[in-house]
Image (cartoon, rainbow, N blue to C red):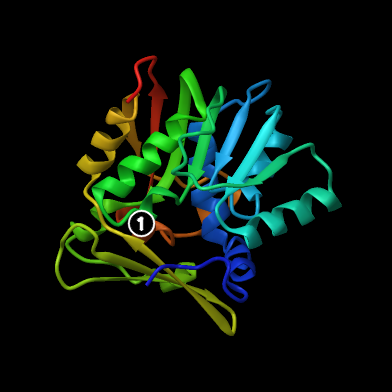
Amino acid sequence: MVTDYNHGNVAKQYEKSKAMPVRSRIEAYSFLKRIGDVRGQKVVDIACGAGDYTRMLCRAGASPVVGLDISEKMIALARESEAREPLGIEYLVADARMTSLQRDFDIGVAAYLLVYARDRDELARMCRGLACWIRPGGRLVTLTTNPALYEFEQIPDYRKYGFQIRLDETVHEGAPIELTAFLGDDSLVIQNYYLPIEAYEEALRDAGFRNVEIHMPELSPGPESADEGGYWNDYLNYPPAIVIECVRSSRGW
């Protein structure tokens, strides 16, 4: 099964999932921390969805900012937000695997893109597409489902965080990673695919990236943290997502 964000209300359901506390307390904090200071930086958000991170980065001082996604419905939602609150963001319907759109952004970001690659060839095409948007010396920061899920001694019950993960019975490249987000009376099933972390590192290097670093998620600091009594431990000890950071070299694929 492939998650089709152009089908029915899938795009709006996915946007609804952004309201889950885990998204802000861990995911967004960890992702934005690695992206760092974007003031005066040219930023492209690849697989931007409805533009949540795109808008955050624009408000943080990035300029210009471009968001692109393969889903027409996602881009329609992003453009609706831009119409309500004009920030000067350009949104494009585009396939992240395209290598014909050569640009020179300082920073490229991509949240949950690479996990849709079902094999190494598709992963390589995605990484080459990412490289085309970023100038030599520029950075790529991508948030992705953790390949180590298949290596954990156990998968905790993530339902208290608003989602659950189901794995295949056997580990093999292309094995499904099925995430169900619980949205009140509704739910959204998202299908990702397993490839080992070595495949990600190899695909990024072959696409012209260097200094590949893997970062584990972190809990955002704040006064509320002291009162949570280890509530987030299952997520942090068995992280279902990671952040990958790398630099675009001058020597491409």
Q: Residues within 10 Å of mark 1 (few under 14, many from 20)?
A: many
Q: Is residue 141 above or below residue 195?
A: above
Residue 222, located in which quarter of the rendered image?
top right
The single residue placed furthest to the front in the displayed view is: 100
Who's the residue at 55% across and 38% down the image? Answer: 32
Who's the residue at 27% across and 46% down the image? Answer: 121
The single residue placed furthest to the bottom in the displayed view is: 185
Who's the residue at 49% across and 50% down the image? Answer: 26
In this rendering, position of residue 212 left or right of residue 139: left
Please name the residue that numbered disc 1 is placed on. 240
Q: Position of residue 168 (x, y in %)?
A: 22, 71
Q: Is 66 or 84 nearer to us in this picture?
A: 66
Q: Position of residue 204 (x, y in %)?
A: 32, 33
Who's the residue at 41% across and 68% down the image? Answer: 2
Element type at mark 1: loop
Q: Is residue 231 above or below residue 166?
A: above
Q: Is residue 189 above or below residue 113?
A: below
Q: Position of residue 81 (x, y in %)?
A: 77, 53
Q: Is 225 or 112 nearer to us in this picture?
A: 112
Q: Is 99 or 204 nearer to us in this picture?
A: 99
Q: Position of residue 226 (x, y in %)?
A: 51, 52
- The number of numbered discs placed on residues in the rendered structure image is 1
Type of amino acid at the residue the image marks with label 1: Pro
Quadrant containing the C terminus in the rendered view: top left
